Image: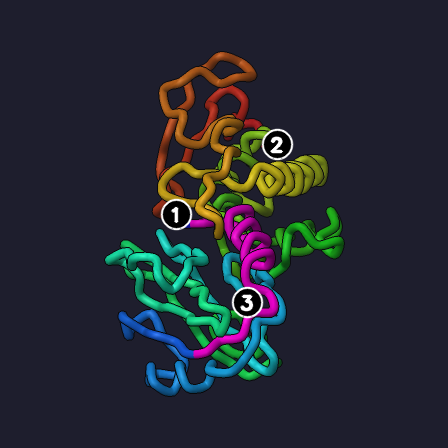
Amino acid sequence: MPELPEVETVKRTLNDLVNGKQIENVTVRLARIIQRPDDIQAFANLLTGHSIVNVERRGKFLRIVLDGLVLVSHLRMEGRYGLFSNEDPLDKHTHVIFHFTDGTELRYTDVRQFGTMHLFQIGEDLQLPPLNKLGQEPLEPSFTPEKFKQIVSGKSTKIKSLLLNQEYIVGIGNIYVDESLHRAGIHPEVSAKDLLDEQLDQLHHAIVSTLTEAVNAGGSSVKSYVNGQGESGTYQQQLLIYGRKDQPCNHCGTMIEKTVVGGRGTHYCPSCQRKSEN
């Protein structure tokens, strides 16, 4: 599933591709992608004639801001956007097409068909599901070490599970939680409340630096992710721990292990991330 760096990269490329374009009509080829309104013709009618003003991100969601409306889109496992000519052949997995007045089309494709779209009046989207319960943005200036400690304080949840909970901190998924915990030298199963202030400072720095580097690299293409221009990210070439089971840790040479935490596959170095020391 695309995480914050990948969705941020899609946001930036879409801004370059579609800002200012006016929607002439919309074709919905798979109804279940459209979650709000629950009528696909109403969805298409509401969007017709509106222009895209900006593309923003909230956590792992895209906010496609139009003049008066906001389309909230979640890519889930394999959702993709791409800009095409209206004469280009359709991929069989194309489920929603935004036809623009200039003869181009923004197409949403999704092999797994798990993506969602919600349409709101401006201002409604942040007050209603799926955005209304999202937590702190980790790349905003407001995400200070002190704010991070407030979020973690007193919680007996395993630190990995806490970081994956989008109601606390948004956008950090399995890849970047593993990477951040490894950088900070923290075992993924340690209880959040047992972490010392120094460890929390290290983890805060690791989260911000890992996500920033990943955004600058265009995200990680460990599966099928590409940006809005069809380009792969390169951060997978810099991953220190994720996906490296039975390979030597770059820091100490110990073989990386994989376990399950909160139902998620979890990579860690048993030497650099000793549970007994936390």
Q: Earlier in the sequence, mark 2 or mark 1?
A: 2
Give the residue drawn at x 42%, y 70%: 98
Q: Quadrant of residue 56?
A: bottom right
Q: Are marks 3 and 1 in contact (CB under 8 Å)?
A: no
Magenta-highlighted residues = 2-24
Give the residue drawn at x 32%, y 74%: 28
- Could one spot residue 161 in this view of the protein? no
Q: Is residue 33 above or below residue 195?
A: below
Indicate which disc residue 184 carries: 2
Name the residue type under label 2.
Ala
Name the residue type under label 1.
Gly
Residue at disc 2, secondary structure: helix
Chief SS of the magenta region: helix
Q: In 3D space, how far apart are the residues under numbered discs 3 and 1 (Cα atoms)?
A: 29 Å
Residue at disc 3, secondary structure: strand
List x then y, in percent, for residue 175.
Answer: 47, 40
Residue at disc 1, secondary structure: loop
Residue that mark 1 sits on: 262
List x then y, in percent, for residue 278.
Answer: 58, 32
Nearest-to-viewer mark from 3 and 2: 3
Q: Is residue 258 left or right of residue 181?
A: left
Nearest-to-viewer mark from 3 and 1: 3
List x then y, in percent, for residue 152.
Answer: 62, 51
Q: Quadrant of residue 41?
A: bottom left
Residue that mark 3 sits on: 63
Q: In 3D space, how far apart are the residues under numbered discs 3 and 2 (Cα atoms)?
A: 32 Å
Q: Is residue 198 above or below residue 18?
A: above
Name the residue type under label 3.
Arg
Q: Earlier in the sequence, mark 3 or mark 1?
A: 3
List x then y, in percent, for residue 64.
Answer: 54, 68
